[in-house]
Amino acid sequence: MAKKKYDTTGAGVEIVLKSTSSGLVSGPAGAVAVGVAEALKHVVYWVRQNSFGGGALAQLQNDRVVEAMEEAARVIDAMRMRGHEPRKDWYDIDLENEKVIASSSGIELLEGTLIAAANEFERRKVKLVANLWSQLAFNPSIDFEASVFLLKTANELSYQQFAILASLTEMSGPPPTAHQAELDLAVAEGEVVSPNTGHDSDHQFVGSSTTAMQVYDLIRRDIVRQDKGNQVPSNTRQIRPWRCSPTLVGRRLYVLTAMRTHVSLQEKQALADELVMLS
């Protein structure tokens, strides 16, 4: 990867929004009025150029990074259209002087997101990971340490586990609000499966063993809990998915990765049907 040109131990880095090789903005000094959304997208391209430049990335990794950047730009534009502004503890956007002051925390999390995208072999996860950073950039209620934890957790889950989490979340009730996820914003939209309105049993789950292991792992990670934590399965034979609901971490992942949008209703419904299978 390209040699970094900034000190990550300092307060941050000044990113000038005037004429650059990225092509996002151009023209003589002071001639361009850069919008907030364009400024934040410029940060993404700046990190791409300074931390992921040169020939260090394989073609597949580069494709994933580009896809993540395109999704991030789309989300940023959508946030702008809704009237939201980026958090100022990571990105202080000075439109008058056409520059962004990006904190080391904001840069590091963006780098971590692009690394996760570059190394992600499941292409369906790339948009989820890109949404996580893009929406964290508008949610100052989540501090840096919590953001790193969410990114690390998202990086370790499979796409199928995201889809299972989406299904379990919607089966347990209406999609979480920003308040329920302890966030500033919850903006994802999309069709959801119907909540479980009464199915319950002590019988053993008889869906696939892979699904059982994935649900068990979500419980082990405390992303979902069975019967609000009153039942803690010690093996996959004891899981009862129809009694599972997301924890705060699960609700935050559901909201911030926009899985409501990026996991199709068809996928969620098929999983919901399997998750209530019993002997």
Image: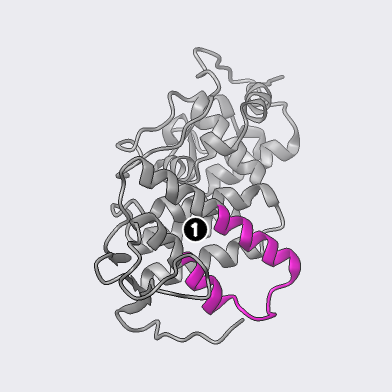
Amino acid at the residue labelled 1: Leu
Structure colour scheme: one colour
Q: Residue furthest top?
A: 198
Q: Going 68% across and 21% down the picture, which residue do you hit?
A: 277
Q: Is residue 102 above or below residue 155?
A: below
**Among the 4 quarters of the image, the one containing residue 117:** bottom right
- The foreground one among 188 and 219 is 188
Look at the image and say whether residue 170 sits in the magenta stretch.
no
Look at the image and say whether residue 51 sits in the magenta stretch.
yes
Tell me if I can see residue 6 in this picture: yes
Q: Is residue 217 above or below residue 175?
A: below
Quarter of the image where the C terminus is located: top right
- Percent x, y for residue 92? 28, 66
Q: Going 66% across and 21% down the picture, which residue do you hit?
A: 273
Magenta region: 44-70
Secondary structure of the magenta portion, mostly? Answer: helix
**Secondary structure beneath label 1:** helix
- Percent x, y for residue 257? 50, 46
Q: Is residue 214 above or below residue 44?
A: above
Q: Going 60% across and 78% down the picture, which residue do you hit?
A: 53
- Residue at mark 1: 151
Q: Residues within 10 Å of mark 1 (few under 14, many from 20)?
A: many
Direction from residue 97 to residue 5 in the image, left or right: right
Tell me if I can see residue 244 in this picture: no
Direction from residue 145 to residue 57 in the image, left or right: right
Q: Going 64% across and 23% down the picture, which residue do you hit?
A: 269
